[in-house]
Amino acid sequence: TKCERDLLLDCATCGATLPASATSFTDAGHGPASPATRNPAEPIGPGSFPSPELPVTAISLLLLASLVVLLLTAVAGLATAVVMPRTAPLPSIGPVDGDAPTSAGQRWAVRGVVLAFALLAGATVLRTLLIGHAPWSNLHEFSIAFATALVGSYLVVRRTAAIDGLAPLVALLTASIVGLAISLDDHVDPLVPALQQPLLLTFHVGTAVVAYALAGLAFCAAAAEIGHAHP
């Protein structure tokens, strides 16, 4: 009310302290004052997450570690493929066969992809806990999710098809995506209005991530086939 505003102005001028009851009023029609709450769509700032520097640092370390593992896997696997006889059949690409030829280099490449998947999955989980929703609201988060889904799709498909020979190419493509994610700003941006529905964000963008991952895996298979047919 006008009287209460005048009282506040007079006390502020003379330096007097108001009782708690006198500071609880608000404009008519707006109800009693209440503590400010953070909008879930607002970016996370200092103090809105317990020790935010810790998860951010952990995510960066996991991404760097996965990048190193992926690059080493790609280099070692491709080097092994180069020294193999070019007249040999394309190794370990086709239906699952217990007698399919698998070199030691391919087995180590697959292990490298598995390790990279574990590191990327950890980074994805930490990012989800940090921002409080699915981690694909900007290009940095989408790139991390894309890289995780790509190696995850490879490992799932590998259970039903002998594609050990694709491990170096998958590692190389995933390394480029992780490198892109590291180069992008990792600031937590507010969600656009169209994505402020948890189900829409999870299923709509999540489906796009899986689709991109399967397309990337198909690209690696096509590249391997072309490389074998035209050495």
Image (cartoon, rainbow, N blue to C red):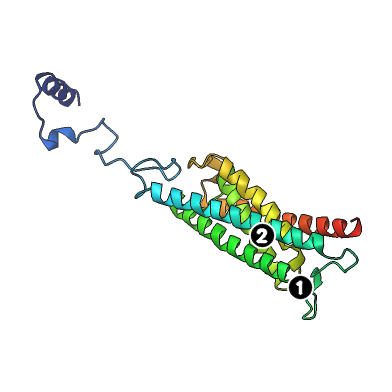
Q: Observer-nearest residue: 25 or 149?
A: 149
User: Residue 15 placed where, x, y %?
Assistant: 10, 23
Of the 4 image quadrants, the one containing the N terminus is top left
According to the image, label 1 marks what residue? 102
Q: Is residue 133 visible?
A: no
Considering the numbered disc 1 on the image, is that residue within a helix, a strand or a loop?
A: loop
Tell me if mark 1 has few (under 14), some (14-19) or many (20+) residues whose alpha carbon lies within 10 angstroms of its own. Answer: some
Image side of residue 111 versus residue 132, left or right: right
Q: Observer-nearest residue: 157 or 76?
A: 76
Q: Given the image, on which type of amino acid does mark 1 rest?
A: Thr
Considering the numbered disc 2 on the image, is that residue within a helix, a strand or a loop?
A: helix
Q: Observer-nearest residue: 148 or 204?
A: 148
Distance (Cα) linking label 1 and label 2: 16 Å
User: Residue 119 placed where, x, y %?
Assistant: 54, 59
Asked whether disc 1 touches disc 2, contact meaning CB atoms under 8 Å apart, the reply is no
Among the 4 quarters of the image, the one containing residue 14: top left
